[in-house]
Image (spheres, rainbow, N blue to C red):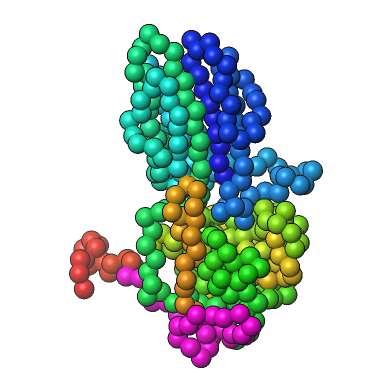
């Protein structure tokens, strides 16, 4: 999602500079403000279907940018409306203003918090000033480094078999940020299991729309799970109300998380899975991962082949059980 905003100080007599993209004008506190937003393909999976559903809710904004004039400076605060980290990239055009950082400026905002991103200050105080800015943001953290020793489970029940209908580099839709994605053809309502453990950071399950057209991209129900290395697994096209989990839940590899469907940009019922990280607010990349099948401990899946999920090994319980109590009732260290 990107946004371009232009603000001029009240002292400025010139008419506002037109943004490079088509604006819709609005007026905020007597300051002319122009803004344009367009959806970044990177995050289309999880946005409501505002563009084509009459009863759609307001578009989800991951971040709220709040420029505030305080003490002769313009402070840019950012409220992250997501539970997960969001990476944003800002660019500015400044007249008679200097910034306390270099642009384009990419930074990560912690989930659910409001923090200051940067400030602008007038160069000559007796002259008017103006600025315009663009922002683009994507869920995730660009500093994530994928643990390549990690082997993923097939995201369906042990003992079941499904065919990969589009693998890595698939021409239908596995290009660009979705290059390293896997599609398994499966009937609507098939149980979906976590391929890797982590924390649920986003769930969309309210869509009942889908079809073989890019216009349905934003209708895909999905679950996003952040892994311990900061990468995020996405499970997409789930059925209406097809999530068993909610944001904040911790899941282990193999846990039932939802049910497959046919929502979003899809040519038929299937499950889409990929692991991704951000590069900047504008760019998300998917990562190649290996899967464990019933008869292979770690392999790259290919289109046209069917794969049977093996039994899930019970994960070792982490050593965070309460320490045994000593005779005096105090916790005993060690042991
Ligand atoms: Zn796909």
Quadrant of res 204: bottom right
Q: Position of residue 203 (x, y in %)?
A: 59, 56
Q: Position of residue 51 (x, y in %)?
A: 72, 45
Tell me, yes or no, whether the highlighted magenta stretch contains residue 3. no
Q: Quadrant of the C terminus?
A: bottom left
What residue appears at the point 38 percent right and 22 percent down from the top-left corner? 97
Dominant secondary structure, magenta: loop
Quadrant of res 143: bottom left
In the picture, measured across the screen, residue 80 lies left or right of residue 323, that is right
In the picture, measured across the screen, residue 77 lies left or right of residue 50, that is left
Q: Position of residue 164 (x, y in %)?
A: 62, 79
- Range shown magenta: 292-319
Which residue is nearer to you in this view: 132 or 148? 132
What residue appears at the point 65 percent right and 33 percent down from the top-left corner? 22
What residue appears at the point 47 percent right and 71 percent down from the top-left corner? 288
Looking at the image, residue 156 lies above or below residue 293: above
In the picture, measured across the screen, residue 254 lies left or right of residue 227, that is right
Quadrant of res 100: top left
What residue appears at the point 45 percent right and 38 percent down from the top-left corner? 90
Looking at the image, residue 130 lies above or below residue 118: above
Decide if residue 314 is in sight here.
yes
């Amino acid at each position: 999602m990107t946004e371009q905003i232009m603000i001029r100080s009240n002292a400025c007599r010139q008419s506002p500079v037109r943004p490079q993209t088509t604006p819709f004008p609005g007026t905020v506190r007597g300051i002319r403000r122009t803004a344009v937003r367009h959806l970044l393909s990177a995050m289309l999976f999880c946005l409501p279907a505002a563009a084509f559903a009459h009863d759609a809710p307001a578009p989800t904004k991951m971040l709220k940018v709040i420029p505030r004039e305080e003490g002769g400076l313009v402070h840019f605060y950012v409220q992250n409306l997501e539970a997960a980290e969001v990476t944003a990239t800002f660019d500015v055009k400044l007249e008679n203003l200097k910034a306390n950082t270099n642009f384009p400026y990419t930074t990560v905002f912690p989930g659910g918090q409001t923090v200051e991103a940067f400030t602008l200050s007038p160069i000559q105080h007796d002259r008017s000033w103006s600025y315009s800015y663009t922002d683009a943001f994507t869920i995730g953290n660009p500093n994530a480094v994928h643990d390549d020793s990690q082997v993923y489970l097939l995201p369906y029940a042990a003992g079941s078999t499904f065919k990969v209908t589009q693998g890595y580099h698939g021409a239908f839709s596995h290009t660009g940020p979705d290059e390293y994605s896997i599609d398994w053809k499966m009937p609507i309502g098939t149980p979906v299991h976590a391929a890797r453990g982590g924390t649920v950071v986003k769930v969309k399950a309210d869509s009942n729309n889908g079809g073989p057209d890019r216009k349905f991209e934003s209708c895909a129900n999905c679950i996003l799970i952040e892994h311990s290395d900061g990468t995020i697994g996405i499970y997409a096209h789930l059925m209406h109300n097809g999530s068993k989990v909610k944001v904040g839940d911790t899941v282990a590899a193999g846990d039932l998380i939802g049910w497959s469907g046919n929502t979003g940009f899809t040519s038929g019922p299937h499950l889409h899975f990929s692991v991704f990280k951000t590069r900047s607010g504008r760019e998300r990349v998917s990562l190649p991962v290996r899967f464990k099948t019933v008869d292979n401990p770690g392999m790259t899946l290919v289109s046209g082949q069917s794969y049977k999920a093996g039994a899930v090994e019970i994960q070792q319980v982490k050593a965070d059980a309460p320490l045994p109590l000593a005779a005096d009732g105090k916790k005993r260290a060690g042991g």
